[in-house]
Image (cartoon, rainbow, N blue to C red):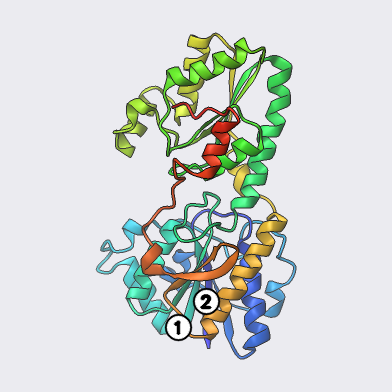
Amino acid sequence: MKVGILTSGGDCPGLNSVIRAIGKHLINNSPETEIYGITDGYAGLIDGEFRRMSAEDFSGILNVGGTILGTSRRPFKQMTLPENGTTRLEKMVENYKKFGFDCIFTLGGAGTHKTAALLFAEGCRIIGLPKTIDNDIFGTDTTFGFHSALDIATECIDRIHTTAASHGRTMFVEIMGNKVGWLTLYAGIAGGADIILIPEIPFNLEKVAEALKRRIEGGKPFNIVAVAEGAVLDSEVNFKKKERAFARRTLNEATVTNHLAQWVSDNVGVETRVVVPGHIQRGGNPSAYDRLLSTRLGSFAAQLCLDGKFGVTAAIVNGQITYNALTEVAGKTKFVPADSQVIRAARDIGISFGD
């Protein structure tokens, strides 16, 4: 049997842990299986760039961040567009068949899963694994990479507390999450933020001001506001993504965070600062939780391959490792429910969501 492994999209902690688990499981349970690393995600499958992997490749990488295979972004929308008489999808299918793959493991997020579903529909045997710090893959309670990023984002907020308290400032910490607010919500609560703003709950500037004034009037000289990069003003909730982006560009702003910080400074009369941890949140070594989760997911996916179960993606549901059909999860996003227990708990302890 001949299998390939690729990592696609943004890097995150846990990718190497999954690669290791897949490799070790196959080596221990199917020694005759040939394992190939596909370079730089779908780009390697498009260009036919593969390398044979040995047992040594899977040693010493459990706690290493990033991906030893390299990764890149190949937008799903471009996979079926004609290029020089063919498409990227057609090139991938051709290389899959020419090389004689029996299965390819695709480690990635939402876009990766959509492309994986396309490949499966074209006759390629695919097994997906849910990777993203955003935790937005439908059908799984948690994605690998999320908890590591959560630890980092929480530490960032922790460290901002001392500066905010020392200077009596209102600090806006912008957390990654363009479409969903899982990372901002969890890090905000764990880091003791006073206000949490996420894409799923459009916020009102005046409501944010009211929450800040209540704290100030209550004798609190500083404030911590956790803002998802994709947080949405209620006045822009009906805007399309491009319209929101245009609104920011006209104000020379990358995200809504700077707009909010300036507005608060002008209208509440407090000193504000914006802190953007950025790609720090997706870098570095995986947490103990992610090492364990990645090992479980990778080993499970390898066994799915040996059992001949393809066209699926591994998942964790209620603590149990399981799988979902790619057709059932590709193209779907797991948003934070507005009535979730986590949000209710946050509201009950006085955290404002600006609504």
Residue found 52% across the figure and 49% down from its top:
134
> Foreground: 19 or 228?
228
Inspect the image, locate mark 2, and give the three-letter code of the amino acid beneath it: Gly
Q: Is residue 96 visible?
A: yes
Residue found 66% across the figure and 56% down from its top:
65
Q: From what the image shows, is residue 120 above or below residue 163?
A: below
Residue found 41% across the figure and 23% down from its top:
204
Q: Residues within 10 Å of mark 1 (few under 14, many from 20)?
A: few
Q: Is residue 332 left or right of residue 348?
A: left
Q: Are marks 1 and 2 in contact (CB under 8 Å)?
A: yes
Q: Is residue 24 left or right of residue 48?
A: right
Residue 106 image point, x, y percent: 49, 68
Which disc is residue 4 wearing?
Answer: 2
Residue 354 image point, x, y percent: 47, 26
Q: From what the image shows, is residue 340 above or below residue 299?
A: above
Residue 94 image point, x, y percent: 36, 78
The residue that mark 1 highlights is: 99
> Foreground: 350 or 353?
350
1 or 2: mark nearer the eye: 2
Q: Residues within 10 Å of mark 2 (few under 14, many from 20)?
A: many
Q: Secondary structure at mark 2?
A: strand
Q: Secondary structure at mark 1?
A: helix
